[in-house]
Image (cartoon, rainbow, N blue to C red):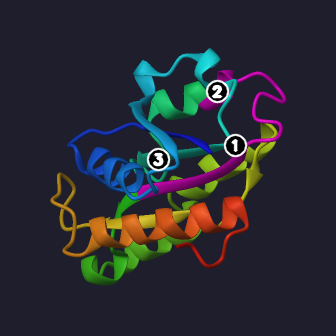
Amino acid sequence: MKVLVIYDTFFGNTEQVARAIGEAFDAATSCEVLRITQVKPEQLAEVDLLIAGSPTRAFRATDAMRKYLKDLSAGALKGVKVAAFDTRADVEEVNSRLLTGMVKLFGYAAEPIAEQLKKKGGEVVTPAEGFFIQASEGPLKEGELERAAAWAVEIQQLATGDRHPA
């Protein structure tokens, strides 16, 4: 299986999550992790699984991620399994009714990323996932890189149909 993990980042938190995801795939899997500005359209040609992630900024993905996904041609991801993630503040920890209301209204970056991937022909293999940061510039909350790695293992199982890896 060939996997491509694409991401954008401001403070390095989303990159850390993307790398943890990429490193979690087994040795039989070819996995490349690239910042969105490094991804060329031809790199999608032989990908079996595409995972895209962005920090949540103003309740959405970064401009670079949104532009990249918007500019993909219709059907560019036909036959490709896809998943999406973001990094985000934990609204329960922030404890702001205003922020909680805004999140309920506008959401996070991962869900619209997953929708764009699906719109371009991708088959979403698992619901979009969010990984928590401690403050707007980070760092990630303790245990999030391990959770990202476990999520990647789950995605691999779902993408290959192997519910019991060796």
Q: How many labels does the image show?
A: 3
**Depth order, front residue of 109/129:** 129
Q: Does the magenta stretch include residue 49?
A: no
Q: Where is residue 151 in the image (x, y as percent from the top left)?
A: 48, 68
Question: CB under 8 Å between callouts 3 and 1?
Answer: no
Residue found 56% across the figure and 33% down from its top: 66
The answer for how far apart the CA atoms under marks 3 and 1 are is: 11 Å
How crowded pointer 3 is (Cα within 10 Å; few <14, some 14-19, many 20+) is rated as many
**Amino acid tagged 3:** Gly
Q: Please, what secondary structure does the residue beneath circle 2 have?
A: helix
Residue at label 3?
53
Density class for disc 2 (Cα within 10 Å; few <14, some 14-19, many ≥20) is some
- Give the mark nearest the N terminus, 3 or 1: 3
Instruction: Name the residue rendered at 41%, 20% in the picture.
Output: 38
| Residue 39 locus on image (x, y percent) | 49, 22
Task: Say if the magenta span includes residue 73.
Answer: yes
Whether residue 60 can be seen here: yes
Residue drawn at 55 percent across, 70 percent down: 154
Q: Is residue 43 left or right of residue 32?
A: right
Question: Depth-wise, is mark 3 or mark 2 nearer the camera?
Answer: 2
Q: Which of marks 1 and 2 is nearer the N terminus?
A: 2
Q: Is residue 10 above or below residue 13?
A: above
Per the image, the residue denoted by label 1 is 117
Direction from residue 45 to residue 164 in the image, left or right: left
Residue 102 in view of the camera = no
Q: What residue type is labelled 2?
A: Leu
Secondary structure at numbered mark 1: helix
Boundaries of the magenta span: 69-86
The image shows residue 33 at horizontal and vertical percentages of 40, 37
Task: List the residue tagged with mark 2.
Answer: 44
Q: How many residues crowd mark 1 within 10 Å: few (<14), some (14–19), many (20+)?
A: many
